[in-house]
Image: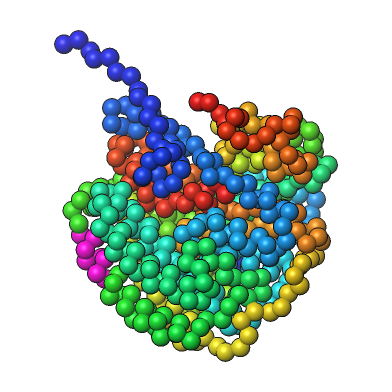
């Protein structure tokens, strides 16, 4: 039988493709259905925020942080405000710190709900799981709306506190949500985790070894799924996380299924944190007054938080003027993509879609 | 809490292992000369007491007459962090050694610095622009980049044709 002549096939995956979660493009080299090489192309959503921020005052830069990771605006706000406060040496009132924790954890639930729902879209469970997840996300967004008027780009945190105190109707609704969520998460687990198709698609695909994850600066649920119990809320506590009791869920081998399990369990831990924070919420002021044109002393600061996607850090350099001299974002979505090639080469092109979905990137944050 | 290792302690450890490296110490960080950067980085990663296997963040700052590269390095096991800096002295054509052989996580971050600041990393395996397209005039995060050079206007006319 004569030997068949084969040659690799180059496929452009994206930028307009539903499973790239935005305008992300991969140049995939395929041998039959096997992935031989992946080259990432990004920048379709690049808005040069780091340059724009150099011309605006510290307070004027807060809305940019909403528009980076638009699915978790609260944590973007929080990381930036922490960096600016560290640079200027501003103390935050206790009530504001609790409010920040409550909103950051609510945001984590909303983000992980989206991440899990869209991941199941990629696995082939078209649209039904994401509708369940959106149901809970709506309730979280309602809480955001009643507090700060916005649902998506919240612009809620301020340097020195938060912009509004919670309204009267917040407490009963938030308490009801906290009571309801554990049952909902159990419902999702019952519906999803034993599903045969999900197991076949997500188990043993996209495996990330722990040492590669550490060397590649991977953070967040992707790092924890490899078995590394690293959570900045525990390791380097900010706000009042050191007073909260919660566990760090970790995976076994860093495959797509582990990442799903870690996110699912993190939602449950977030509910625990919110419940404690709502109980302990002290009265008092919710912000300190800072000058409109804040002039931090000459110096530099790096502050980081555990955002739903991973370690979100802001590096600010001040030259004593009202605008930052340098504004750099350590974006977890970009850095979690670093080992994508190693995770996907040798697998089928269908696994590539699932693996990209399980990393949970947000192109607003990748490109900035 | 993550412990920030003071510059004097890092400098003392580097001096003991690599006496050739020229160091400048500050309260929080150590500035190393560019030719010894990779050796120092390898030492920081492999030294069991420092164990900086996790590169947290790498970035650059335009200091008008030179560029400053900032490396936030941490150890997840020991929960500490240290700050290493180096300088690319030639402002017109800045160049620095790449640390991708030491930490794979530097790969996209050095590409980002190259794209936006224009610092060339010698030894980087895939030094291409990451956000902007090849042929984009200038590097936007430089302080002297105020508009597109050469009177070009931004827009689709200059978008790359693939």
Q: Residue furthest right?
A: B65
- Which residue sits at x=36%, y=82%? A176
Q: Is residue A315 above or below residue B89?
A: below
Res B36 visible:
no
Asked if residue A12 lies in the magenta stretch, the reply is: no
Q: How is the image coloured?
A: rainbow
Residue stretch rendered in magenta on the structure: A186-194
Q: Residue B141: which quarter of the image?
A: top right
In-front residue for pair A276/A246: A276
- Which residue sits at x=31%, y=59%? A130
Residue B154 on image: x %, y %? 64, 36
Residue A353 on image: x %, y %? 34, 43
- Which residue sits at x=57%, y=44%? A46
Q: Is residue A293 above or below residue A358?
A: below
Res A352 visible:
yes
- A177 left or right, relative to A323: left
Asked if residue A190 lies in the magenta stretch, the reply is: yes
Residue A118 on image: x %, y %? 34, 54
- Which residue sits at x=53%, y=58%? A311
Quarter of the image that includes the N terminus of chain A: top left
In-front residue for pair A366/B2: A366
């Amino acid at each position: 039988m004569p030997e068949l002549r084969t040659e690799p096939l180059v496929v452009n995956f994206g930028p307009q493709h539903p499973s790239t979660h935005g305008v992300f493009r991969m140049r995939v080299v395929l041998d039959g259905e096997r992935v031989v090489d992946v080259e990432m192309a990004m920048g379709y959503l690049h808005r040069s925020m780091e340059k724009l921020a150099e011309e605006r005052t510290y307070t004027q830069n807060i809305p940019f942080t909403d528009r980076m990771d638009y699915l978790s605006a609260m944590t973007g706000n929080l990381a930036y405000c922490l960096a600016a406060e560290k640079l200027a040496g501003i103390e935050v009132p206790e009530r504001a710190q609790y409010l920040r924790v409550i909103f950051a954890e609510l945001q984590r639930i909303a983000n992980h709900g989206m991440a899990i729902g869209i991941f199941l879209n990629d696995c082939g469970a078209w649209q039904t799981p994401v509708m369940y997840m959106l149901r809970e996300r709506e309730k979280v967004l309602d809480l955001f709306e009643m507090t700060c008027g916005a649902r998506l780009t919240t612009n809620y945190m301020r340097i020195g506190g938060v912009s509004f105190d919670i309204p009267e109707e917040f407490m009963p609704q938030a308490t009801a949500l906290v009571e309801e969520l554990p049952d909902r998460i159990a419902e999702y687990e019952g519906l999803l985790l034993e599903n045969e198709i999900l197991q076949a698609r997500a188990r043993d695909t996209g495996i990330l070894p722990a040492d590669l994850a550490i060397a590649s600066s991977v953070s967040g649920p992707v790092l924890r799924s490899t078995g590394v119990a690293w959570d900045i809320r525990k390791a380097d506590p900010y706000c009042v996380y050191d007073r909260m009791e919660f566990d760090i869920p970790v995976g076994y081998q860093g495959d797509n299924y582990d990442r799903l399990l870690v996110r699912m369990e993190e939602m449950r831990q977030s509910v625990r944190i919110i419940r404690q924070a709502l109980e302990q919420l002290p009265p008092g002021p919710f912000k300190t007054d800072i000058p409109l044109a804040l002039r931090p002393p000459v110096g530099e600061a790096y502050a980081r938080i555990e955002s739903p996607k991973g370690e979100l850090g802001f590096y600010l350099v001040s030259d004593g003027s009202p605008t930052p001299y340098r504004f750099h974002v350590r974006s977890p979505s970009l850095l979690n993509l670093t080992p994508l090639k190693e995770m996907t080469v040798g697998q089928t092109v269908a696994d590539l879609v699932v693996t990209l979905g399980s990393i949970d990137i947000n192109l607003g944050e990748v490109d900035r | 809490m993550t412990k920030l290792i003071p510059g004097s302690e890092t400098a003392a450890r580097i001096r003991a292992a690599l006496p050739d490296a020229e160091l400048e110490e500050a309260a929080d960080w150590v500035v190393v000369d560019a030719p010894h950067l990779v050796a120092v980085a390898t030492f920081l990663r492999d030294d069991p007491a420092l164990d900086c296997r996790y590169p947290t963040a790498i970035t650059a700052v335009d200091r008008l007459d030179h560029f400053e590269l900032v490396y936030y390095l941490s150890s997840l096991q020991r929960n500490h962090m240290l700050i290493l800096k180096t300088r690319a002295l030639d402002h017109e054509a800045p160049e620095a050694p790449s640390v991708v052989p030491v930490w794979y996580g530097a790969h996209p971050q050095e590409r980002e610095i190259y794209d936006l600041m224009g610092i060339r990393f010698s030894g980087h395996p895939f030094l291409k622009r990451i956000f902007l397209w090849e042929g984009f005039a200038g590097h936007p995060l430089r302080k002297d980049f105020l508009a597109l050079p050469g009177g070009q206007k931004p827009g689709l006319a200059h978008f790359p044709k693939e």
